Image (tube, grey):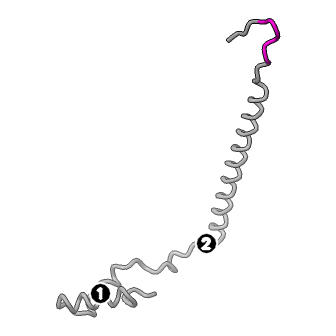
Amino acid sequence: MRSGRGVRGRFIKAYAREVGVDCAEALRRYRAAQPKSLLLKCADPRRERAADADAWTALRVALVVFLILIVATLTLSLLCVTPPPAAGCPSRY
C-alpha cells in the first residue's frame, strides 16, 4: 500500500482538515518522511540462501553439542555408580 492511501492517508487528511492545514501539503510531507521503497534495497538471493545455510549449520552444531552432552552425562552416570557395600564391611559414608 502506498503511503498516503488507506487508513493513514484518510487519517492525515482528516487531521489536516481539523487543524486547518492543506491536505495535499500534509500528505506530501508524510510521503517525504517515509523510507524509500524496499525494492531499492533488494537483497541478492544467493546471500539470503547463504545466510539460511549458515543458520542451519549453527543449528546442527548446537544439536550435536547437545547430544554429546547427553551421551557424556549418561556415560558418567553409569560409570560412577558406587557398588553396594559387601556384607560385613563398614560403609565409607
- Is 61 rendered above or below residue 27? above
Secondary structure mostly seen in the magenta stretch:
loop
State which mark lies toward you, 2 or 1.
1
Q: Which residue is mark 2?
A: 44
Considering depth in this image, is 6 or 77 the residue closer to the camera? 77
Spot occupied by residue 31 in the image (x, y as percentages of width and height):
35, 84
Magenta segment range?
84-89
* Quadrant of the rendering where the C terminus is positioned: top right
Left-right relation of 38 to 24: right
In the rendered image, residue 28, in percent from the top left (x then y), is placed at 31, 88
Q: Badge 1: few (under 14), some or many (20 or more) residues near its Cα, within 10 Å?
A: some
The foreground one among 5 and 83 is 83
Magenta stretch contains residue 38: no
Q: Is residue 41 left or right of residue 79?
A: left
Disc 2 marks a residue whose amino acid type is Asp
Residue 77 position (above or below residue 83): below
Give the quarter of the image for residue 89: top right
Residue 22 found in image quarter:
bottom left
